[in-house]
Image: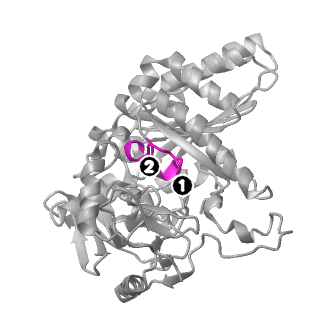
Amino acid sequence: MQTYFANNSCNPIADQSEGKCGIGSYVQYAIDVSGDADVRAGLAFAEKNNIRLVIRNTGHDYLGRSTGYGALALWTHHLAEIGPLTKDYKSTNYNGPALKVQAGVRVGDVYDYLEKQGYMAIGGECPTVGLAGGYIFAGGHAPTTSKLGLAADKILEIEGILANGESFTAAPDENQEIYWFLSGSGSAGTIAYIKSVTFKIFEDFPVSGTILTFPYAGVISDTEFWSLIDTWHNLTPNITDAGGYAYAFYQKGYFQIWPLFVPELSKAQSAALIQPFVDKLNGLKVKHPSLIYNLTSYTYPTFNQAYKALFPALGAGTLQWSSRLIPRNIITQQPATVSKAFKAIFDDGATMVEVIMNPNLEVAKPLNNSVLPAWRTSIIDLVVGKPYNDSAPFQENADARTYITQHWTSALEQLAPASQGGGTYMNEADADDPNWQESFYGANYPRQLAIKRKYDPTGVWYAKTAVGSEYWAEDAEQRLCPVSPSSAPQVARSME
């Protein structure tokens, strides 16, 4: 969980001189779910005792959706069954290979399982991500996003339990409203508990990868560096058009592309995608002989081998984030504006990560889902953050969050406004974004809210910035209470 939402009051690193140690915002109790009966028991208990209920899946959570003050959690971590793998799954919309997984299955385990069978799937970059939780239902980007689309685009079937305890199966041709809502609307615990997901899988393929690292502190000027970044941004459409995916990391005095990940191209073809960037580096090296960069390229016979080699483990919860999906036309038609905005945020102390990808409709081929429309035209997901300081007073970190919202989130929304196709991937978002409905859901939100109100009229399921969460707010004692509009449920949920 993102550290800000964790149990700071018992933080073993922070100053405890005042002797305060309480449960904080952690859930009070959790049900280790092993079957449907556990879920129904939790629903009934929460309803009878007027208690807040949350879904606690597995993996990581940057928005604080998997916890809540005074709450009871349905913990799905041990629902870890993978399979069956069906090579000839048949439906009215799709015939081909598919895999079913339970709610607690992690991405890395799916990759390992499928590689042995000669297949791969769309999953996250971190092996501990819970594939069948908030990842897939919020869209879910992956190293193959420019080639195959988002994880939500491949959902074939969803099994779960509604707030009233009723079981359901949702598919493009069955319970279509529920299927549409869940396939892109974010947290599973918005209208239902999810116990399993079946999704398309693909025959395995080779992958090429390129890594470029570039320390530049004290070697080139600021102007030369940002001119180099203009060249990099100019190459991003070619990368995504080739089915490629890349991370670019910005740190003071250091820039790296790690990795450029391109399915079904040779390492020479992969390296050629960034050759103009390398050429510009070589030109700078003539002017600045002390300039050093490292460029390496690789080829791997399977997706999983490439994934394990090219995506190093990253800590979750160490940074406080904001992000923005930036459309292709802004990158290509307004390069000076883009560089100016990026530079301003970077110079203001942000750690910046670009994810280069484009799950356009042609490659994604979604069946019928509620994925944020901004995904389809974006080619850069820019993520900016400040480190979370565990040893600092809590208020210092809270102030950093406020600064991010007021300065960086605002700047990113000005750079890529919703009116020009901008949006935000909710799983990597600023949880305090005041424009979250527009940023996270876009034009889909009115329909999403109507479905939420239909299937969960009393507000059993709540998560921060989830559909319908504007009907609720935490009071001074952190109880979840109803707020305007007046049609919101007139109850307060707490643990007495």
Q: Position of residue 408 (x, y in %)?
A: 58, 36
The N terminus lies in quadrant? bottom right
Q: In this rendering, is residue 210 above or below 86?
A: above
Q: Nearer the viewer, residue 19 or 324?
A: 19
SS class, disc 1: helix
In the visual, does 5 lie left or right of 284? left
Q: Which residue is mark 2?
A: 141
Q: Position of residue 311 (x, y in %)?
A: 59, 50
Quarter of the view holding residue 98: bottom left
In this view, the mark in front (1 or 2): 2
Q: Please, which residue is most extreme toward the top here? A: 287
Q: Nearer the viewer, residue 343 or 16?
A: 16
Q: CA distance from mark 1 to mark 2?
A: 19 Å
Q: Is residue 470 visible?
A: yes
Does residue 438 show up magenta in the picture? yes
Q: Is residue 120 visible?
A: no
Q: In this rendering, is residue 84 above or below 234?
A: below
**Which callout, 1 or 2, points at the residue further toward the start of the chain?**
2
> Residue shown at 57%/25% (left/top)?
341
- Amino acid carrying label 1: it is Gln
Which stretch did the figure color magenta? 424-439
Q: Position of residue 439 (x, y in %)?
A: 41, 42
In the visual, does 82 lie left or right of 382? left
Please tell me the numbered disc located at residue 305.
1
